[in-house]
Each structure stands twice: as structure tokens, then as C-alpha cells.
Image (cartoon, grey):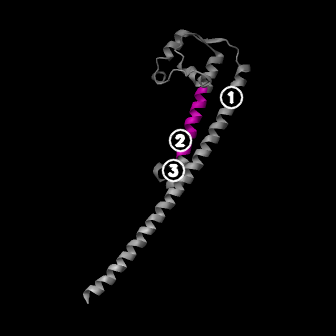
Amino acid sequence: MRGWRDAGQLAGLRTELARTQAGAERVRAEAIARARAADAAAITDLQQRLTRAAATTEDLRHALATATTGRVCLSADARRVLHRAPAFAAVPAPAAGPAATGPATAADPGERASTDADIAGWALDAAALYEQCRARIDAIRQWDEQVNGGAHGR
């Protein structure tokens, strides 16, 4: 008699276990779907922000060409001193080809004087790099808020 009663309880426990596992699988699948959707949304937003920032930077670069005079404002000696700053040690050498324009000027070792156009271009490059970094951090924050409710940032 006891075996029949235990068999019934065992069957009930197996059914409950199967329901619990199915629920856990459903929760896991929903979490994965939320993470994928958040990932796609964050990447799309990041790409749009980077595209807008690049377009704005390019517009500003053209405007600077007319707003600067080419007057020397920083000597080669001063540039060499500045290039000893730790940040310049991490700047890679400029790549060859069309991708070598823009922030690659930061890798210049400072062997010549800088004009107002050089300094303005450097400031614009620094601002563009800052905006890229901010956009990436914002994309990570957006993803985290959608996936985890932002609980990790608190």
C-alpha cells in the first residue's frame, strides 16, 4: 500500500519539478530576448550618435578652415614638452590610407611649430573622441537599464 501512496507523491513531485523547470526556461528565454533587443537598440542608437557626431565634426572642420589664419601659436619646443605627457605614449602611430586623417595628428611627435589651425583641429579631434567615448558609455548604460533595470549602475 505504501508504495502506491509514495508513487503518487513521487509523480506529483515530478510534475511540480517539470513545471518549475519549464518556468525557469521561460524566464531564461525572456531574459535572453530582452538582452538581445536591448543590445540591438543600444547598438543602433550608438551608430546613429556616432554618425551624427562625425557629420558635425566634419562640418566644424570645414568651418575651422575659414576661421583660422595659419598663424604660429605654439613652438616646436613647447610641442615636444607637451608630447612627453603620459597620454601621448598611448597614441598609436597614424595608419596609412584615408583612415589616417583626423585624430592621428595627436601622434605627431611635435617636431614643428603649431598654427592656430593645428591647435583648433587638435581641440576638435579631442572633442570628437570625447563624444565617441560618451556615446559608447551611454549605449552601455542604455543596455543595462533595459536588461537589468539599471541596478548595476547604482
38, above or below 20, in the image: above
Q: Which residue is mark 1?
A: 58
Residue bearing mark 3: 144
Q: Secondary structure at mark 2?
A: helix
In this rendering, position of residue 82 left or right of residue 48: left
**What is the CA distance from the residue labelled 1 to the residue labelled 3?**
31 Å
Residue 126 colored in magenta in the image: yes
Query: Which percent across, then down, holds residue 107?
Result: 53, 19
Question: Which element carries disc 3, helix, strand or loop?
Answer: helix
Q: Residue shown at 40%/72% (left/top)?
A: 18
Q: Which x, y percent locates residue 39?
A: 55, 49
Q: Compared with residue 152, is residue 86 higher up or lower down, i.e. above or below? A: above
Choose between 54 and 113: the one closer to the eye.
54
The image quadrant that residue 113 belongs to is: top right
Residue at (36, 75) in percent of width and height: 14
Depth check: give the residue in front, 21 or 35.
Answer: 21
Of labels 2 and 1, earlier in sequence is: 1
Q: Residue furthest right?
A: 66
Coordinates of residue 45 in the picture (x, y in percent): 62, 45
Outermost residue, left direction?
2
Three-letter residue code for mark 2: Ile
The N terminus appears in which quarter of the rendering? bottom left
Q: Nearer the viewer, residue 24 or 126?
A: 24
Query: As shown in the figure, which amino acid type bears the numbered disc 1?
Result: Glu
Please name the predominant secondary structure of the magenta segment in the image: helix
Does the rendering let one see residue 154? no
Q: Which residue is mark 2?
A: 137
Q: CA distance from mark 2 to mark 3?
A: 11 Å
Stretch in magenta? 125-140
